[in-house]
Image (cartoon, rainbow, N blue to C red):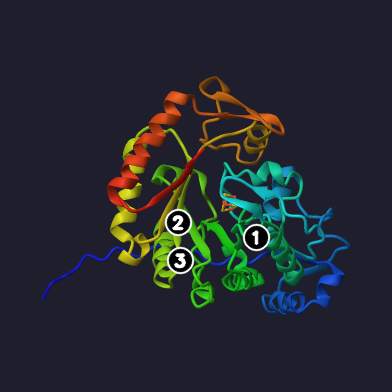
Amino acid sequence: MSTQLLTPAAPSTLVFVPELVYFEPDALNYPKGQRILEWAREQKLDIHMTTSHNQIRDLPGESELEKYRIAKRTLVVGIRKTLKFDTSKPSAEYAIPIATGCMGHCHYCYLQTTLGAKPYIRVYVNTDDIIGAAKQYIEERAPEITRFEAACTSDPVGLEHISGSLRELIEFMGTQPLGRLRFVTKYHHVDSLLDAKHNKHTRFRFSVNADYVIKHFEPGTSRFEERIAAAGKVARAGYPLGFIIAPIIWHEGWEQGYAELLDKLYASLPPEATTDLTFEMIQHRFTKTAKNVIQKRYPKTKLEMDEEKRKYKWGRWGQGKYVYPDEQANALREFITERIFDKFPDAKIEYFT
Ligand code: SF4
């Protein structure tokens, strides 16, 4: 009889359940608003009404930091009024807004600055209006294909058990010869999307990184192993798959860290996952405003944000950002690119930025 050493499995990352929920009164006129209300009641959540999803002013908390932590556990259910979509280069033509805000606590996340004083999580119940707007954008660009990015302002997979909006978008895009959907996630809760009729029009991407980055800067998200297991599932469900390596961070032992990342992807992905595979690479960047906010919200962060060590890149819309000097950026790009092609010769690298 053989004995096996069993290491206890790490606990599974749970789905997000907020502490507080706010509803705009009109949101309850929509079936989705009603469904979310029912769910919130079942979960015995603290339920409030609000006049607008843009004005939640009475969040509890003694200090700014406490208010921020509570906001990250607050869900606001509202109606998306602005149906003009932002552009979303280089990953897609447009950002499609189904949610704003995220329960993750990634130190580097740009939502810290773009959402300013409103870090709470908003989901929108008028998905039909949002889909209607997408349809118009597709028609305007015909016969070109139009791509929509659903993860510009949130991590929609992490909210899918509450809203179900991603499945609706996936199935809508499945019917559109000229429409494509893409999104990226750090959550592994993909089961409700596996049998959606995607028609291969949705590229399902996972955000991955070197161990060091995941361990130090991504609290509140699914573990690497969970994300990879989920990637295998979506590939087996026939979705085109992608990985975003972002933010790529220069750290001690980075070569080993990123080499191991590619080794682990190679070892864990089923063959179906590698037939139509894309990679996107984004080096770490920060603005002065972001640095300020991050240092307040995560005062003990190990995230290196030393302007002296970076190159300043002027921004098109005002404030510029700090990226790695060319020599470092090139070293990162070349090393990771080589590793990708070594393991996945048929993969497509979409960009490094
Ligand atoms: S999971 Fe994505 S959207 Fe959420 S905090 Fe982390 S980086 Fe930001």
3D distance between C-alphas at marks 3 and 1: 44 Å
What residue does disc 1 label? 142
**Marks 2 and 1, how far apart in space?**
25 Å
For marks 3 and 2 on the same chain, the one whose residue lies earlier in the sequence: 3
Residue type marked 2:
Gly
Instruction: State left or right for residue 349 relative to residue 97.
Output: left
Q: Whole-Å distance between the Cαs marked 3 and 2?
A: 23 Å
> Would residue 308 appear left or right of 225 to someone viewing this image?
right
Quadrant in which the N terminus appears: bottom left
Residue 327 is tagged as none
User: In this figure, which residue is indicated by the disc labeled 2?
Assistant: 242
Query: From the viewer's perspective, is residue 31 above or below residue 152?
Result: below
Q: Residue at x 45, y 53 (%)?
A: 243
Q: Answer above or below: position of 315 versus 26.
A: above
Q: Can you say whether 126 is above or below 217 in the image? A: below
2 or 1: mark nearer the eye = 1
Q: Residue at x 37, y 63 (%)?
A: 273
Front residue of 177 and 239: 177
Q: Secondary structure at mark 1?
A: loop
Q: Amino acid at mark 3?
A: Ser
Query: Any mark on residue 12, and which?
Result: 3
Query: What amino acid is labelled 1 in the image?
Result: Ala
